[in-house]
Image (tube, rainbow, N blue to C red):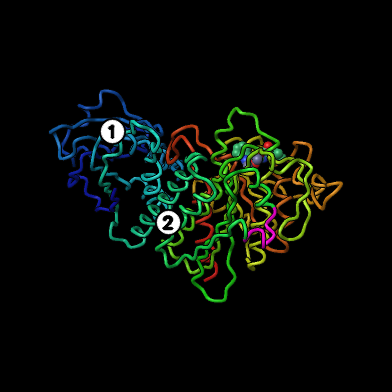
Amino acid sequence: MKINLVPNQIQKTKGDCLIVFVTATNTNDDSYLLNISQKLNIDLNQHLPNRITNKVESIFSIPLLNESNVKHLLIVGSGKPETLSYDIIRKVIGKSIRKARALNYESVTIDSCPFEQSKLKKEKILQIISETLIMGQYQFSYFKSTKEPLSNIENINILSSSPSNKSFQAALSKGCIIATAVNEARNLANTPANELTPKQVTEYAKDMFQKDKLIDLSIITPNKAHQLGMNGLLNVGKGSENKPYCLVLKYMPIKKKDPIAIIGKGVTFDSGGISIKPSRGMNSMKADMTGAAAVISSMFAISELKPSLNIMAIVPLAENMPAGNALKPGDVITAMNGKSIEVINTDAEGRLILADAICYAVKENAKLIIDIATLTGASLVALGELAAAVIGNNDDEINQLIKISQETGDRVWQLPNYDEFKDYLKSDVADIANCSEGRYGGTCTAAKFLEQFVDKTDWLHIDIASVMKTKKTQGDQVTGMSGSGVRNIVEFLLAKEKSHK
Ligand code: BES
Ligand code: ZN
Ligand code: ZN
């Protein structure tokens, strides 16, 4: 599917399907629509017995047959001009491209000019349009014998006031790269655990980065993990036939500069272990590697966008299963930095593998650590399915991430990092417990646990359990696993590049 910017000349549109947006309230005599009907040489009123509205996501579908160069016109409501937002653009673009796909068209033209006239940033609008066109058409039908019909859309032309503007074109292709990365993350998260073991994730990454000269890939095998003292990872993985691994990807274009580390939780299946989970909903624990998927896919986007910034990705991978030799509640293990941990609950496994990955990042002199993980069900209790939680030890970094997330579509909301949460993690026998006996403040106590391993390094933790899954197809979201986190990580890193220049 090709996405191009073309001059704003509706009269020259030859594509099958033209998508236009109405923001005016007084729509039937709206000058914008009158202008379109004149240019298409049609009498719109004849096609519009009812008054059309600017209600967000309302679609008026008008087949034009042989009346015009264009076969089909979609008039899509996008609210009042003064309330137009990036989220509304996502909603209306997603809705209309899925409609054009259902109508089976090959070539689609979208008039982005009404958006360009708003106060929103023009480049951002174009980036969001291209992201939504790609993310909004995502399908995962790999395992279905009758596949959902693939999109016939081959060409999308976006009408723009300045189609040859280099920064507009760059924004469009940035959107394509990021959306492709999000869809890859969705593929990984949707793939079931019998098809995606820790080792298979490493093989997937090998395939992806094999020919990429900018990315250096290395794999920490169980033996190597043993030498390094990664006992959190080894203990979580020991109840499974599928051995644990840790993937390390380095993108280091600048010599002698410490990297930013991004760490993703890669539990390819979380049964809970001996502290086994209830069976209802356990199937969705195949996506307990959404953090890993986000990190790997972000590295793919980074290798395409090529910022001048050193980045190191660390992805601990394990399957959490109950077995005769599995980790047990009450066991005491020693993390890579020598701290002893009492395992109160084997279902709090993500923090055990992340602890080792964080220690590894500290050893590699990371100047900032960002970890992303489907860590706690408590994040759903706190935020519903509407935002990820962010907790950290540096308010400037937290505020920067929040600011960025307000434009990316991946919402985050800050939760507190009070010192007193450490009291929830007291152990009678070890330096720290992996969780508290009680259920209160679960997202905060999980973060407090991770903080014990970051040393003095600046650190941001993003809990994406709440947004792991999408229930309703809307805008750029499609039912299934969301691929959440990629946009925030990539944009956050790109912003870091800018602020360091
Ligand atoms: N992977 C789960 C968290 C999760 C829950 C992710 C729902 C996505 C959706 C995590 O490993 C877990 O089980 N956490 C426990 C921690 C508890 C035992 C302290 C939880 O949230 O219940
Ligand atoms: Zn768990
Ligand atoms: Zn888990």
What's the residue at 67%, 34% (across, down)?
Answer: 276
- The answer to whether the residue bearing label 2 lies less than 8 angstroms from the nearest atom of ligand 3 is no
Q: Nearer the viewer, mark 1 or mark 2?
A: 2
Please, what is the three-letter code of the amino acid marked with disc 2? Met
Relative side of 410 to 304, left or right: right
What's the residue at 33%, 39% (across, down)?
Answer: 97
Q: Is residue 230 magenta?
A: yes
Report ligand 3 position as a quadrant: top right
Q: In the image, which disc is placed on residue 208?
A: 2
Relative side of 448 to 14, left or right: right
Farthest-out residue, bottom: 256
Magenta residues? Answer: 224-231
Relative side of 444 to 128, left or right: right
Please, what is the three-letter code of the amino acid marked with disc 1? Asp
* Majority secondary structure of magenta residues: helix
Q: Residues within 10 Å of mark 2 (few under 14, many from 20)?
A: few
Instruction: Pick whichever, 117 or 139, lies toward us.
Output: 139
Farthest-out residue, top: 49
Residue picked out by circle 1: 29
Q: Is residue 188 magenta?
A: no
Q: CA distance from mark 1 to mark 2?
A: 53 Å
Give the image location of residue 29, x and y in percent: 28, 33
Q: Residues within 10 Å of mark 1 (few under 14, many from 20)?
A: few
Residue 401 visible in the snapshot: no
Element carrying mark 2: helix
Give the image location of residue 471, x and y in percent: 50, 32
Instruction: Pick whichever, 153 or 360, lies toward us.
Output: 360
Mark before the other along the chain sequence, 1 or 2: 1
- The answer to whether the residue bearing label 1 lies less than 8 angstroms from the nearest atom of ligand 1 is no
What's the residue at 60%, 51% (across, down)?
Answer: 244
Please say if 54 is above or below 343: above
